Amino acid sequence: MMKFMRFILTCGLIIITLGGFSQKLVQQKVESYCNTNPRLTYAQYAISVKDVKTDSVVVAINEKKSMTPASIVKLYTTSAALQELGKDFRFKTVVGYTGTIQKGVLKGNLIIIGGGDPTLGSKFFPQSKQFVDSIVQAIKKKGIQSIDGLIVLDCSLYGKEAIPQTWVWEDFGKDYATGVYPLSFYDNVFSITLKTGNVGDTAKITQVFPAEMSTTIQNNAIVGDDKSQEPSILGNPEELSRTVSGVVPANRNSYIVRGAMPSPPDAFGMEIKQALFRANMVKYNQEYIVKYDPFFKDGMDTVLVLLSPELELIVGITNYHSNNSYAEHMLKYMGYAKLNKGTFEAGTKVVQKHFTDLGMTSQGAMLYDGSGLSRYNTTTASHMTEFLIKKYQQGADTSTFFRSLPISGKPSTLRSYDFPSYMIGKINAKTGSMNRVRNMAGYMTTKSGKRVAFCVMIQGFLDTDGDMKKTMLDILDSIYTNY
């Protein structure tokens, strides 16, 4: 019996020793690579890798240095949303009326109460495309043939702060930097269709969608072949004017440029008004108003409640496609639901509390938005891996959070990485990038079958973004192969 126990103890010591040797080896390999790679000479980088089973450190390089996280912030936001709101949560948009219906005429106001749903008419949920028709049909079924009153858009849920104050001017007006409103639709994105001719000509605007927008568009788009000046739409989020500029290809009958929709609640009101006009329910000059302050609506009769898809589906789209709009809508709603303040600041406080609830001890995460677009955000590699370990302990591979992460080799934000065949399906992770920032964080199953949580952040580099992707792959490959 004693011999058997000594044998078991010896085997255990061998396993521990081999495990420690493996960790030391991969640390040396990654450290050597970073020290000798000329692409990293002028860059800042931080790497943290931990074994999810033992919570032991595998690689630690500058792991406590504060870095710009970019879109890996969405891991924090989506995790908090699932925890605080629940995976089955649905946003609600309520349609109702005040007054009375007399012989088919509504003697009162039509009211649409925004509930912060980012999915109305979204390209990611085709089933929601017909939401305007659903509203019109529900009004008809209520016995309303015409409306003798106002169309009131209740946007009192959040107030007027639509854009985080720490976003930079160069992002304003871009289709990835849309605002957050109680009433959002079509992903808060509008498009301008251009017809182009010969080089040097000014492109012609042939269509704007949605068409019912009170927007002044300055067209500065020039026809040419300079691909470094891709066309974009710029504009102050608090103004209705927009400018389309840049260089567009020659001889195109239809060239589409997309940007952030100016005042989605106003565009929403115009869209509803036009739909009701086409149904002969309102006059052409029917008024609509957007209310940002709470107002008296007691006694309102409900016509329709539009429900978003379940939150777990929204989270999946957010992480797979790095959807900034969805992330910011979730953040703001968490602030409203948990702190009764529909602000970005309140939302980030909910996320910070989420770290405490997970029992985390590391410092380093300072958040100013939910998507990672703010350059004021910071986190550390060690904070991220501790967070990922805590999340993995909650549900491992079967959790909603884990299943929301992009998979190497599958269509997602990871598709731009040329993973070797042996790493396909071995990584579940979120990327984060902006100018001179290239990050990735998530989970990896290594060659030996071990599961690790990792965070790699590279910033301030002088090489091309493509070179940094290769560097990222080299680091991940070294971890995969040697641990």
Image (cartoon, grey):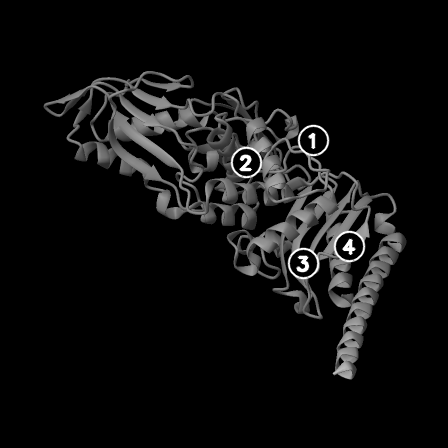
Mark seen at residue 376: 1
Q: Amino acid at mark 1?
A: Tyr
- As measured in the structure, the alpha-carbon distance from the residue carrying label 2 to the one carrying label 3 is 37 Å
Residue type (three-letter) at the residue carrying disc 3: Val
Q: Identify the secondary structure beneath mark 3.
A: loop
Q: Where is residue 301? Give x, y as percent.
A: 23, 27
**What amino acid type should be assigned to the residue bearing mark 2?**
Asp
Closer to the chain start, of discs 1 and 2, is 2
Circle 4 Cα neighbour tier, 10 Å, few/some/many (<14 / 14–19 / ≥20):
some
Disc 2 element: loop
Camera-side mark, 1 or 4:
1
Residue carrying label 4? 471
C-alpha distance separating marks 2 and 4: 29 Å
Q: Nearer the viewer, residue 156 or 174?
A: 156
Instruction: Write down the residue under mark 2.
Output: 175
Q: Say few, some or many: other residues with alpha carbon within 10 Å of mark 3 (under 14 / 14 to 19 / 20 or more).
A: many
The answer for how far apart the CA atoms under marks 3 and 1 are is: 30 Å
Sequence-wise, which precedes: disc 2 or disc 3?
A: 3
Numbered badge on residue 52? 3
